[in-house]
Amino acid sequence: MSKNKALWKIPNDSFSKLIVWFKDGNVRTFYSLDWKHPKAKKRSKSLGINCLKRLVSSYGKNAGVAQIYDIASNALVQNFYEGIPTRKKS
């Protein structure tokens, strides 16, 4: 966070993103909240990923396929099917 910036911004300051393909045909992208409050001094990648995992599990069977990606490297972090973690493809 730079000196001129007062608050963290989504998606600019997020470490991860979640893409969910719902069974009804909708597709949504969510970005991680890697900080506990808007004026926090530090970000935590694990905090953001845990929040995204909780979000996927709350959708349950309504979410057909969901994937968490690292934004910086665009690498796949975790796959989900109907809210349940699966092995990521090589």
Image (cartoon, grey):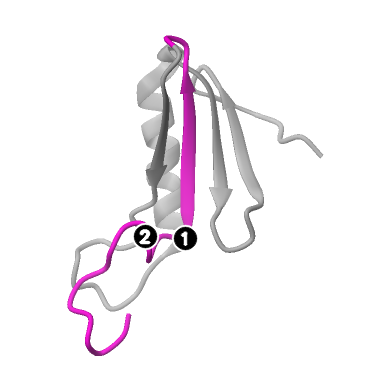
Q: Earlier in the sequence, mark 2 or mark 1?
A: 1
Across and down, in percent, residue 21 comes to 49, 23
Mark 2: secondary structure: loop
Q: Amino acid at mark 2?
A: Asp
Across and down, in percent, residue 42 comes to 34, 75
The CA distance from mark 2 to mark 1 is 7 Å
Q: Quadrant of residue 72?
A: bottom right
Mark 1: secondary structure: loop
Residue at the spot 57% in from the left edge and 27% down from the top edge: 80
The residue identified by callout 1 is 15
Q: Are marks 2 and 1 in contact (CB under 8 Å)?
A: yes
Vertical comparison of 46 with 30: above or below: below
Across and down, in percent, residue 49 comes to 46, 49
Q: For residue 16: magenta?
A: yes
Which SS does the magenta portion mostly show? loop
> Magenta region: which residues?
1-24
Across and down, in percent, residue 15 comes to 47, 60
**Left or right of 88, for residue 4:** left
Q: Nearer the viewer, residue 10 or 42?
A: 10
**Left or right of 83, for residue 79:** right
Residue at the spot 20% in from the left edge and 71% down from the top edge: 7
Viewer-side label of 2, 1:
1
The residue identified by callout 2 is 34
Look at the image and tell me in which quarter the C terminus lies: top right
Residue at the spot 41% in from the left edge and 65% down from the top edge: 44
Q: Quadrant of residue 12?
A: bottom left
Vertical comparison of 57 with 76: above or below: above
Vertical comparison of 78 with 80: above or below: below
Vertical comparison of 22 with 6: above or below: above
Q: Amino acid at mark 1?
A: Phe
